[in-house]
Amino acid sequence: MASLSDRMIGAAMLNPATYEEVEADGTATGQAALVVILAAVASGIAGLRLGFGTVAWMIIASLIGWVVWALLTYTIGARLMPEPTTRADLGQLLRVVGFASAPGVLAILAIVPFFGGLIRFAVSVWQLAAMVVGVRQALDYSTTGRAVVVCLIGFVLQWVVIWMLFMMTVGTTALVGGAFGR
């Protein structure tokens, strides 16, 4: 069994064998959650100029997004768009989606002036590519195209859910506070 750092590097390098390993290791869900948290902290540190609450929000949103995206990917990929060879459960998708967050630790580099936005964009694209590789492996798809479709649908739906949660919590508080002059 590979170490957490080896798995994170393998996942970030888009190594299909790494995704197969974490998919099969039922004890790696905690590691996957840690990868999500590390990526969220890195992103939050890069956004510290927005306040410490940003880091807390990034961790909470990332954990919620991780579970939501895994659930959506499972539903879309294993239930609505399976191939005959698809055999997956939610735990496998939680592990694969969590490790697909591994490139996110580089989001800390977004602290670099003038390049922060570009770095965040590059890291996001890299994470999406990692997700495609992981989903292809976890759902035993024969082609990458089907994994791309599942990931794009899941990505959009996950952001809708996160945005709704944001608006119900932070956004509503800000709107109400602004309406009453707070």
Image: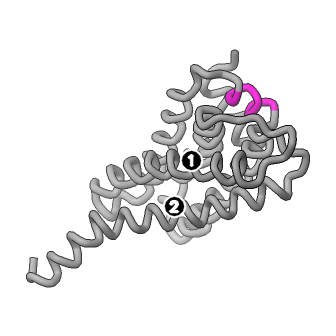
* x then y, percent, for residue 75: 63, 50
Q: Magenta segment: does it hold 33?
A: no
Specify the amino acid type for callout 1.
Answer: Leu
> Which residue does the image show at 10% across and 76% down from the upper left?
182
- Which range is magenta? 17-23
Residue at label 1? Answer: 71
- Indicate which disc residue 26 carries: none
- Residue mark closest to the camera, 1 vs 2: 1
Left/right of residue 138 with respect to residue 161 in the rendered view: right
> Which residue does the image show at 64% across and 46% down from the upper left?
74
Q: Residue furthest top?
A: 1
> Which residue does the image show at 64% across and 39% down from the upper left?
93
Look at the picture and state if 65 lies above or below 87.
Answer: below
Left/right of residue 168 with respect to residue 35 in the rendered view: left
Specify the amino acid type for callout 2.
Answer: Val
Q: Distance between the residues labelled 1 and 2?
A: 34 Å
